[in-house]
Amino acid sequence: MTIQAEVDILEGLSKIDQGLSSLLDELGRERTALEGKQQRLKELQSRVASAAQGLQDMDRTRSEILTEVRQMSVQLDRSREKLSRCRTEREANAAQREVEEMRKLYRDREQEIEKLVGFADQAKSELEKTAAERDALETELGASEGDVTHRLSELEVQAKEMDTKRNALVAGLNVVLYRRYEMIRKRRGVAIAYTSDGICSGCHVRVAPMLFHTLMRFTSFDQCPNCNRILYYREPGSATPAEPTPPAAPQDS
């Protein structure tokens, strides 16, 4: 395989890799955004359910205390009646203590009810805010989730198509050269660069004249001494090579 043929494959491979990188980045952003909203919706739904259950528990407790208060009221009336019937000072003192204890218990229960009402009002307010956020997010997802899912499917199809083209190009590339390409790509993102005037297109640093003249003879590849990208010579003013047709079978250069 000629150096030019290998250049064409490397350029096509680099173009696909850059496109794949952008595509996978977009796919990741779209998927992360969708999953984030779905997770947030689950959290809100759980909070709404938990808050509603909490309100039910508070209402039940309040109802139980109200029942207890009504019973205390009846008992307090009886204690007062008992006090009014006392004939001795000792009986009166005992009845008075009973009345005072019942009044204290009655006041304590009333205060508990007031606190529960305050907690319930606060819980209702928070529940309304959470439910409103949940409803808004459900509406947003309902309107966009189908489009986002469709977009994700499209991106996945494009990624598979590009990956298939990439594999076909790799199959026609010298194994050693491909390994060098991959090693540089993983470090630099883009593994290949060209020079038309002695300056590397990847890092914009001038290469040594001897290296430049060697590249101009188009008999071998080299690497930029500064950025280590695979470097080749391109005629000044020439366009970027079109994506090559994958070779029928892998060949060694």
Image (spheres, grey):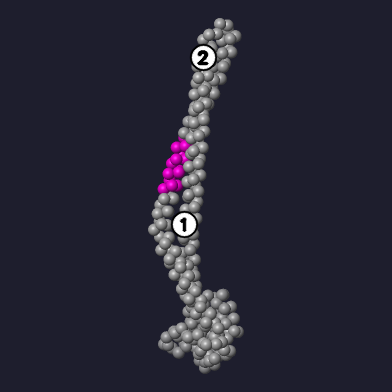
Can residue 213 be seen at all in this image of the molecule?
no
Q: How would you rate the neighbour count of disc 2 (Cα within 10 Å): few for under 14, some for 14-19, many for 20 or more?
A: some
User: CA separation, marks 1 and 2?
Assistant: 63 Å
Seen in the picture, residue 232 relative to 150 is either above or below; the reply is below
- The residue labelled by disc 2 is 80
Q: Are marks 1 and 2 in contact (CB under 8 Å)?
A: no
Locate residue 60, reporting x and y percent: 50, 34
Locate residue 2, reporting x and y percent: 53, 92
> Circle 2 — which element?
helix
Residue 119 highlighted magenta (yes or no): yes
> Circle 1 — which element?
helix
At x 47%, y 37%, the residue is: 120
Residue stretch in magenta = 118-132
Sequence-first disc among 1 and 2: 1
Residue 137 highlighted magenta (yes or no): no
Front in this rendered view, residue 88 or 61: 61
Q: Main secondary structure of the magenta part?
A: helix
- The residue labelled by disc 1 is 37
Amino acid tagged 1: Lys
Going by the picture, which residue comes out furthest to the top? 87
Amino acid tagged 2: Arg
